[in-house]
Image (tube, coloured by chain):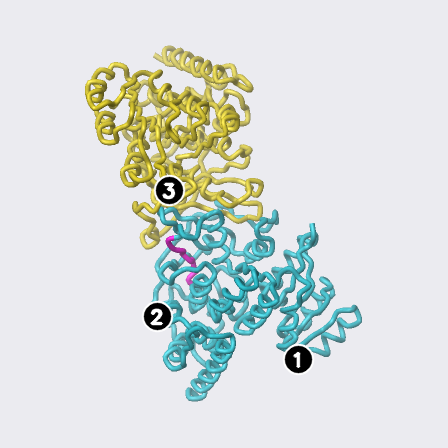
Chain colours: A cyan, B yellow
């Protein structure tokens, strides 16, 4: 069997590191050909020395000389900056591009990889949130496949195996509810970055942890699911399930519901995407029903978490509305982490942007990129006016 | 589309009646060609007048003239006795035989139907418990298919769709735990038929309700699963799940678990078996996660419920051991309902029989029938000696 050749974008983040764990556990199956990272040059250098890719890219140009100095001598090409990442994304001598970049910056790499006809394992949900329709058309045109790495979407995808798409009545995305599930709404204004970074069940990066606290992550997942599984917004439901054991569910037209369960560990959805349709006999921690005494469910509190309502609204509006939501949310999350705005300002700014910015129907990729720029400008004006 | 022509054996029982509900709801899909019942002549007559089969059979010969008197005038042939049921089972002008007979009496009808090359939807788990290996060989020889109607096995079967059999690590059968889940062991000797007939979640016939109270039903399901899904005994686990919402689960080699969930209603597994591989858009009650606040799990208490241990032991022993367990259990259940023995005598008698009776390896169908007779004789001797 030939090894599957991989480009791994975002190798130093949580998903990137877990992907390399899997590659290490199954060296007979996978070969790392390219790696990219944002800023963490030290870890990228270490990974490159271990996995020996042909080339790496570091987004942070100030780190280029450092990385090149370490890797050139061992015969590894080093690229840098956004353009370096984009170039790696479309190199053709791989079988699959794993896009584990966090945020808006993952869109162009997804687009370039698919344009080059590569299959893509997508952790960067923002690609589909911002340009789902465009990406679906591109996948069809290039006859490329896209496999989700998100645990919820992997669960839905697993539950859909062997089932006909037209028999799906709805999907039910589960969410832990985040650290503020039980906090009264009147205390939301005093939420600090420290408290928001404590996620009850999943160990993730900072951006997605804040999105999980605001439930914007669930909103982004709703939008992602719409494009991944070709569903109408009303076919996508959310239920709060604090234990994060049921990763999501599908209800069929006969009332039967299938669920996928597992320990909260991203290695499972990663390896499922890397090796689909084969399941890998890897031994991470397994579910133990002797330890799981109970699983609970509760409705989402839309008053406390307006992000989910905003996500549905952008889906119904269509065009670049979801892209606006995504870019303004991302900027707001980092502003919150920098203590420039409060926690409840995050959805407020998104809602303001959706009311203020032009929405382009049937956007091209340029329209989406223009939306990113408009979103940034809008955000900066808002922050400036706040001071 | 041609209607699927059905023989329904055991039409007046709980599964039989639910099957006719589905046929009524989808008359464009199904046609009832033959019906059989045990003793309930009035209901059989009513069903026959409504569904207009070519023929019916009534096992209780004393009711033959009554049934014939009512149905002959409307052109419906009437058969009676065991032989009448057997004859209907193998009539060739149908597409599928639904075997909803309860207990040992369902074995020969299954065997005859498959021998005639018919696909079979099997609610009579005793067929597989008593002669699983034989039936599997016969299915292969006749190129016939067997679809389970048990909710647990339907759940496993649904979870296996689109998955490769070799990727199954284990299955996890769920059980409500029955009405005596929380009763201390020392009170088991005072259990009455009335208290045992109150099942917390499922509405079923008397025999299966008592089996659910002793957890012998779970034992029979373990044996059934071994033959349905070609599993080793150690690949079959049981977990107590009192709400009966998760109907069973499959764990794969990568640690991913799939579960099938639904309201506790046998119409779902029946319609899935009747119309596989198509799901029918029938609107029974659906799961509502607004109402399901929590799902709980606990280990099985093997001290209180030795039936499950006995089932595993017969699987490991092989041959006619499971047939002995089944026949003696069945007799013991009816003796308990008649207040001739106590609740804890049920597994005790099964265990005694397994120690006392000869076990035939690689049995023929005659060997299995001989085992039924030996089991009856053993049981009668035991009961006689108890008086």
Is residue B206 visible in this depiction of the protein?
Answer: no
Residue B45 placement: quadrant: top left
Instruction: State which region is magenta.
Output: A169-177
Q: Is residue A193 above or below residue B361?
A: below
Circle 2/circle 1 CB separation < 8 Å? no
**Viewer-nearest residue: B69 or B217:** B69
Q: Are marks 3 and 1 on the same chain?
A: no
Circle 3/circle 1 CB separation < 8 Å? no
At numbered mark 2, what does the secondary structure look like: helix, strand or loop? helix
Residue bearing mark 1: A61
Q: Chain of mark 1?
A: A
**Viewer-nearest residue: A171 or A240:** A171
The disc label shown at residue A185, or none: 2
Q: Position of residue B371 (x, y in %)?
A: 46, 16
Q: Is residue B59 above or below residue A234?
A: above
Residue B213 placement: quadrant: top left
**Residue A69 left/right relative to A259:** right
Tell me the mark number nearer the camera, choosing from 2 and 1.
1
Dot 3 alpha-carbon crowd within 10 angstroms: few under 14, some 14 to 19, many 20 or more: many
Q: Position of residue A373 (x, y in %)?
A: 50, 82
How many numbered dots are placed on residues in this image?
A: 3
**Residue B167 left/right relative to B274:** right
**Viewer-nearest residue: B352 or A368:** A368
Magenta stretch encompasses residue A28:
no
Q: Say which residue appears at 53% left-offset and 49% top-offset.
A: B256
At numbered mark 3, what does the secondary structure look like: helix, strand or loop? loop
Q: Chain of mark 3?
A: B
Magenta segment's dominant SS is: strand
Residue bearing mark 3: B244
Residue A18 placement: quadrant: bottom right
């Amino acid at each position: 069997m030939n090894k599957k050749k991989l480009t791994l974008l975002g190798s130093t983040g949580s998903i990137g590191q877990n992907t390399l764990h899997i590659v290490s556990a199954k060296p007979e199956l996978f070969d790392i050909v390219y790696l990219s990272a944002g800023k963490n040059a030290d870890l990228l250098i270490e990974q490159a020395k271990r996995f020996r890719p042909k080339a790496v890219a570091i987004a942070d140009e100030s780190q280029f000389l450092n990385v090149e100095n370490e890797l050139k001598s061992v015969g590894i090409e080093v690229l840098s900056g956004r353009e370096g990442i984009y170039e790696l994304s479309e190199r053709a001598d791989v079988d699959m591009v794993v896009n584990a970049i966090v945020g808006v910056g993952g869109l162009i790499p997804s687009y370039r990889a698919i344009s080059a006809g590569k299959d893509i394992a997508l952790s960067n949900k923002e690609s589909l949130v911002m340009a789902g329709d465009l990406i679906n058309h591109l996948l069809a045109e290039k006859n490329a496949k896209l496999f989700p790495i998100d645990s919820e979407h992997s669960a839905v995808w697993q539950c859909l195996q062997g089932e006909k798409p037209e028999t799906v009545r709805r999907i039910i995305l589960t969410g832990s509810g985040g650290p503020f599930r039980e906090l009264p709404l009147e205390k939301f204004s005093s939420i600090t970055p420290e408290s928001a970074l404590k996620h009850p069940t999943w160990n993730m990066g900072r951006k997605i942890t804040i999105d999980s606290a605001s439930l914007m992550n669930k909103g982004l997942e709703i939008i992602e699911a719409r494009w991944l599984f070709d569903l109408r917004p009303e076919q996508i439901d959310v239920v709060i399930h604090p234990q994060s054991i049921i990763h999501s569910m599908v209800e069929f037209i006969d009332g039967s519901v299938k669920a996928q369960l597992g320990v909260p560990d991203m290695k499972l959805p990663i390896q499922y995407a890397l090796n689909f349709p084969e399941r890998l006999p890897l031994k991470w921690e397994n579910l133990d029903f002797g330890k799981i005494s109970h699983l609970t469910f509760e409705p989402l509190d839309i008053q406390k978490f307006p992000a989910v309502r905003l996500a549905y609204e952008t889906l119904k509006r269509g065009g670049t509305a979801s892209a606006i939501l995504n870019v303004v949310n991302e900027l707001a999350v980092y502003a919150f982490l920098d203590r420039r705005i409060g926690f409840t300002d995050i959805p407020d700014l998104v809602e303001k942007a959706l009311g203020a910015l032009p929405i382009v129907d049937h956007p091209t990729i340029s329209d989406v990129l223009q939306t990113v720029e408009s979103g940034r400008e809008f955000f900066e004006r808002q922050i400036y006016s706040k001071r």
